Amino acid sequence: MKFAVGVAAVLVIAAILLGFSWPKEKGLILRNPQTREVYTSFSLEEGGRFSITFIHSVNKTPLTDVYEIRGGDIYVVETKYYGFGAGVQTELEEGQSLRYAEDGAMIISGFNKKMTGMVYVVGKISDHVLKIGEADYSLTELCGKGSAVEFVYRR
C-alpha cells in the first residue's frame, strides 16, 4: 500500500514538473498552437455551429467559413464568399451545392471535412471575426493581431 501511494506521489510531482495540467476548459477552445496557452473558450454543444469571417487578401471581400461540432470534432460545412481569388474554391466536389444569397454572395455547402489541427492567423490589417449564435467576437481583441489561434473542441 505504501508503495502505491509513493508511486502516485511521484507521478503527480513529475506531472507538475513537466507542466502537465488536466484540461479544465470544455466546449470550443481557442489556444496558442505552440504553447497551448488558452486564449478563451466558449460553451458549444454537439451540433452547434460557429463561423469565422475575414477579408480575403486577394479579392478584398468578406469570406466566411462555417463549422459544426459532430461527434466531438470540428467539421467545415459551408463557405460564403463574394469573389474569386487565390485559395477560393472554383469547382464543386461530389455532394456539394452552390446557391446565391440575396446580396450576391456565393454559398457552397455540403462539405464533410473534419478539421484536425485547425489554425487561423489573426489578420494584421483586417480582423477575423468569430460568430457563435448571434454574438460576434474579434479575434484581434481575444488573441492579438498576428497571433496563431488553434481551434479545438472538448466535451
Image (spheres, rainbow, N blue to C red):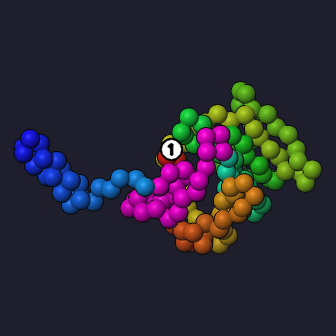
Q: Tell me if mark 1 has few (under 14), some (14-19) or many (20+) residues whose alpha carbon lies within 10 angstroms of its own.
A: few
Is 6 magenta? The answer is no
Q: Residue furthest left?
A: 2
In the image, taking residue 21 as reference, residue 45 lies left or right, namely right
State the SS at label 1.
loop
In which quadrant will I find the N terminus? top left
Residue at horizontal 57 percent and vertical 42 percent from the top: 74
Q: Quadrant of residue 55?
A: bottom right
In the image, taking residue 86 as reference, residue 121 lies left or right, namely left
Q: Which residue is mark 1?
A: 155
Amino acid beneath label 1: Arg
Question: Residue 147, percent across and down?
Answer: 51, 67
Question: Residue 70, percent across and down?
Answer: 60, 37
Question: Residue 95, percent across and down?
Answer: 73, 27
Q: Is residue 76 above or below residue 135?
A: above
What residue span does the magenta drawing correspond to?
25-48
Residue at horizontal 90 percent and vertical 54 percent from the top: 103
Using the image as rendered, state which of residue 128 and residue 50 is in the foreground: 50
Is 27 magenta? The answer is yes
